[in-house]
Image (tube, helix red, strand yellow):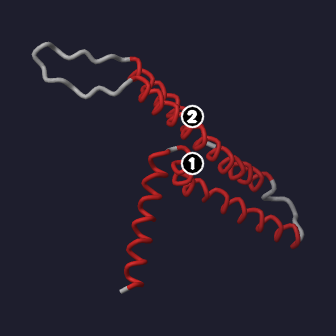
Amino acid sequence: MGTPLVMIVLAVLLLRSVRNITQRRVVPKDDAPPIAIIKGSDLQCIDSRLTLMLFLQLIIAITTRVPYAVQLVYINITQSWPKSPLRIAIENVLIELIHLLSYTFFASSFYVSFIANRDFRRKFKNFFRKLLIILHRREIN
């Protein structure tokens, strides 16, 4: 249950930091060389993408970690109860399904990046296009 709470706190701090950066204006000194300054619209686009990524990751964290926490509470409460072999088998299957669900949190960052980040998708497509070209050339030779 601590994972979603930590993610919420870190997401709020990260968004606050990004928004402070987008509101800040850099003014170079007269004798300083010109600095590449990112336009405000680009920063707002980055901010909205980051917000979407954090929101998606937070939803995934909550949906994958809350069942695990509930399962731990359930095990502790029903630990001393008499259980039939069928009930034990059903509980074990559900426990394994919950563990499998909790593992998806760790694999989800790729999918969140793929869904929310246009540049990531573009690089991913280019990588596979180049890979297909290389494989096609090997088949011809």
The kind of secondary structure element at disc 2 is: helix
Q: Residue 114 location in percent, x, y?
A: 53, 51
- Left or right of residue 78: residue 113: left
- At x 77%, y 52%, the residue is 74
Outermost residue on the top side: it is 30
Residue 3, by quadrant, is top right
Split into 4 quadrants, where in the image is the C terminus? Answer: bottom left
Rendered position, 100 above or below 6: below
The kind of residue tagged 1 is: Ile
Residue 59, by quadrant, is top right
- Left or right of residue 86: residue 53: left
- At x 44%, y 46%, the residue is 119
- Residue bearing the label numbered 2: 8
Q: Residue 127 location in percent, x, y?
A: 41, 62
- Residue bearing the label numbered 1: 115
Q: Residue 107 location in percent, x, y?
A: 55, 57
Report the number of discs: 2
Rendered position, 122 above or below 48: below
Earlier-in-chain disc, 2 versus 1 = 2
Viewer-proximal residue among 110 and 72 = 110
Split into 4 quadrants, where in the image is the N terminus? Answer: top right
Disc 2 packing (10 Å; few <14; some 14–19; many ≥20): some
